[in-house]
Amino acid sequence: MTSSSAETSTQAQETQRQSGKGPSTQQSTQVATRPEAGPGAGAVAVETETGLTRIAPAVVAKIAGLAARDIPGVQAMGGGISRRVGQLRSLIPGSSEATSQGVNVEVGQRQAAIDLNLVTWYGQSIVDISEAVRRNVIGQVEGMTGLQVVEVNIQVDDIHVETPQEQTPSRVQ
């Protein structure tokens, strides 16, 4: 670019800024979003003028799992085998609950799709619980990651029925 064309381009940009039709003089918070390759493969990277932030799909799954569990009426998450493994894991001292159990995510450059497997309590509206879970998951994932959640698919794998043993308190204290 020649010196005169660079000056003309700079003058045009300054005129656009002043008229409010060009790029803002304020700092942009999101310059580009791109998938990463390498050690964090599958991670989403949000690049700003001040640095790069990588969000792993496992983080999105964890956020979605915690948001789903927040809804009253969700008794457990995951299919039959994964729930049993989770129950065994919880018996090990010092272990924590698998927060992404029953959650599958697909993360793109700017969007995410989430699949959830739930167990609800008997007697509660599955439709109401599903809608509440969907709203909470979308709100939490979009709010925390900036990704647009395009769909939240929910599969109810089971209904938990409280047994009489669970209802009556122990006679011995």
Image (cartoon, rainbow, N blue to C red):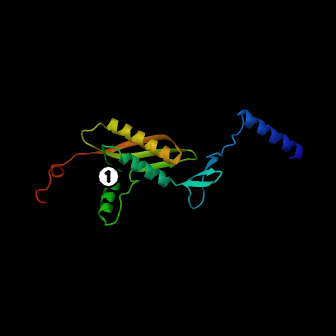
Residue at the front extreme of this rendering: 18
Residue 82 coordinates in the image, percent (x, y):
35, 55
Classify residue 161 as left or right of residue 78. left
Residue at the bottom extreme of this rendering: 93
Q: Amino acid at mark 1?
A: Gly
In the image, 22 versus 97, the foreground residue is: 22
Residue 42 shows up from this direction: no
Classify residue 107 as left or right of residue 171. right
Label 1 CA crowd tier, 10 Å (few <14, some 14–19, many 20+): some
Residue 35 shows up from this direction: yes
Classify residue 16 as left or right of residue 41. right
In the image, 151 versus 6, the foreground residue is: 6
Q: Which residue is mark 1?
A: 80
| Total tally of numbered discs in the picture | 1
Residue 57 coordinates in the image, percent (x, y):
50, 53
Residue 31 coordinates in the image, percent (x, y):
64, 47
Identify the residue at image location x=22%, y=45%.
161
Identify the residue at image location x=77%, y=39%.
14
Classify residue 60 as left or right of residue 133. right
Identify the residue at image location x=31%, y=66%.
93
Label 1, secondary structure: give it.
Answer: helix
In the image, 101 versus 155, the foreground residue is: 101
Residue 152 coordinates in the image, percent (x, y):
44, 41
**Quarter of the image where the C terminus is located:** bottom left
Identify the residue at image location x=48%, y=54%.
59
